[in-house]
Each structure stands twice: as C-alpha cells, then as structure tokens.
Amino acid sequence: MKAVVIHATGGPEQLALAELSDPVPGLGEVLIDVAFAGCNWADTQVRMGIYPHHMTYPMILGFEVSGTVAALGPGVSGVKVGDRVAAFPEKGGAYAEKCVAAASGLIKLPDGITLETAAAFPIQALTAYHMLWTIHGGIGPSDTVLVNAVGGGVGLMCTQLAVHAGAIVIGTTGTPGKEARALEYGASRVVQTKTEDFETAVLDFTTGRGVDLAIDSYGATMLDRTFNVVRRLGHVISIGEAEGQPLKNIRERILPRSQTFTRLHLGHVDHDLPAWQAGIDHVLEGIAAGWLKVPVEGVFPLEAAADMHRRLEGRHVAGKLLLKAGV
C-alpha cells in the first residue's frame, strides 16, 4: 500500500510517500480500506515532535479516517466486511491506503453521510460535544460560551452545537476573515485579537460578569488571559497549545474566582461509556438534520500531504482539510 511516513520530526518536507506492506488487524481491530483521512492540528504537532502524548517514529500520520471495513481481527463482532465507517486510529496510520483501528471506536455511517463528510467531522465534532456535555455537564439558553480560535474546525463545531442548544457564543480569532463562518453559524460576536483587546471585549459583552465556559486551543498567554474573562465558579477547558505552553501553575489562575479547569484529550473518553455513543448519535442527527455543517476546505492526494500541512499552518483554513486515498 501507499502511505505517508514521517521518519524524523521537522517541517512539512518530512512527510514522504512510501510503499509499505498492508497492516494486519490485531485483537479487537479492523482493517479499513481508506477513502479519506482528516487533517488535524495534532498532525502538525506530531510532525514537529511537540505533541503532548508520546509517539514513536518512524510512523504513519493521521488519527481520523473514513472508508470501508476490509478485514476483521480476532474477537471483533458487530461489524462486517464492507461496512462504511469512520474511525480513530489512536496511534496514527490514516495517511495511507489501508489502516487498522479499534473496532470499539468505529462509527457506522448512515446512508446519507458521504465518506468525505465522515472523515471531516469525528475528531472535531466529538471533541466539541464532549467538552460541552460530558466534561461541562451540558449547555443551554442560560449559558454564555467563549470559544477561542472560533474559526477553526473545533471552534466551528463548538459554535454550532452551543448555539443549537440555545447558548450565546462569543469567539476570538487572530486571522481576519475567519470570523465570517463563525458568525454565519450563529456566534453573536467575534473579537479580532490583533486589533482588539479580547479581555475588554468579552467583559463588555457580558457586562462585566464574564462567560460561564471558555474553550481554548491556543495555550500560551491566550489561555492564561482567558481565566480573567470567566466568571466566578466558571469553567475553562483546554484542548491544545497551538501557540505554546501556558503558565505551568494553573492554581494561580483558578484561585481568584474558584474556577474549574479541564485539559481534554478525546482519546480518554472510553468507547464503552454511554456518553461515547450519545455524542455520535447527537452529531450524526445534527448533520442529517442540516443544522450541523461540516465544511471541507480542500482535498489533497496522498502525495500532497506536505502541501496540506502548509495550508493548515497558514491559519487561513475555516473548515477541514482531507487527504484522499481511495474512492
């Protein structure tokens, strides 16, 4: 099979197309004929060697995939060869013509969901769902939510899910133009961080009270400052450090207002929990009903994986980039 391999960490040029033996599914795994692989910011972190979870090199990148089941490993039930699925290969492998994934995390696709859409929603939409419901405990009309990087993939999913639940969303973006889709999807206000002070803007928007929940993927000083705009007993959820490591002593940030802080990794949501299937059901229902949009900004062939990473790192993408491996 053809696969995109990274032998050493570094820039996009480290992504190399190679011919490898087909993987073999192990206990509890399935082999998938890959149609599309989703590109996520985590992929660029793994490539650069700064991903917060341990990875072993050389490796095939990609943690999000859609396709059809090609073979079953030992102990797999409830799925058959030929089923259309999306999946999460937690150790990578999606940037290839074939990959293995745990059967427990498979998403069986309804007829109305295309394989292209199926590779574009799982990580971002389910991350958003589990922040709002599994971690935060639910969201509704009485809530105001701050979404940093609101024009990115997770930000757009958070916006749509929160707005559909009746919450008010205020977002931030550092790239002019990326506010358009967030506003289209229902955000009430988007702060341009390069020309506006986001702390002043958020506190003005909430008449000094602060937001109930803040979601941050920037890290660095942006996360540190976000605690200043969250109300007493409010909640801050971190899902990434795109701008760098934040202040190490989080206690200093949560102490003044008795806030709660969570650092979420989607891989820590157990597939056997009722919340896992509840998230899948909610997201699929939203896509089918049309209120949850899954914008795809570009589709690249396997040999152009480096170009895909360069485009993502340009910070002008308001949606999803995909690698196309098959039909």
Image (cartoon, rainbow, N blue to C red):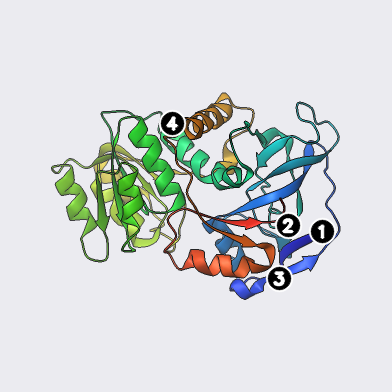
Query: Residue 88: image x %, image y %?
Result: 65, 44
In the picture, measured across the screen, residue 313 lies left or right of residue 145, that is right
What secondary structure is marked by label 1?
loop
Q: Identify the residue position indicated by label 2 in the image.
A: 96
Q: Identify the residue position indicated by label 4 in the image.
A: 133
Q: Identify the residue position indicated by label 1 in the image.
A: 1
What secondary structure is marked by label 3?
strand
In the picture, measured across the screen, residue 286 lies left or right of residue 165, that is right
Residue toward you, 161 or 293: 293
Mark 2 vs 1: CB contact within 8 A: yes
Q: Is residue 226 visible?
A: yes
Q: Residues within 10 Å of mark 3 (few under 14, many from 20)?
A: some
Mark 3 vs 1: CB contact within 8 A: no
Task: Quote the CA–CA distance across marks 3 and 2.
Answer: 11 Å
Mark 4 vs 3: CB contact within 8 A: no
Please state which amino acid type lies under the numbered disc 4: Trp
Q: Is residue 112 above or below residue 151?
A: above
Figure quadrant of residue 97: bottom right
Query: Residue 66: image x %, image y %?
Result: 66, 45
Which-is-in-front pick, marks 4 and 3?
3
Which-is-in-front pick, marks 2 and 4?
2
Q: Identify the residue position indicated by label 3 in the image.
A: 16
Q: Is residue 46 above or below residue 160?
A: below
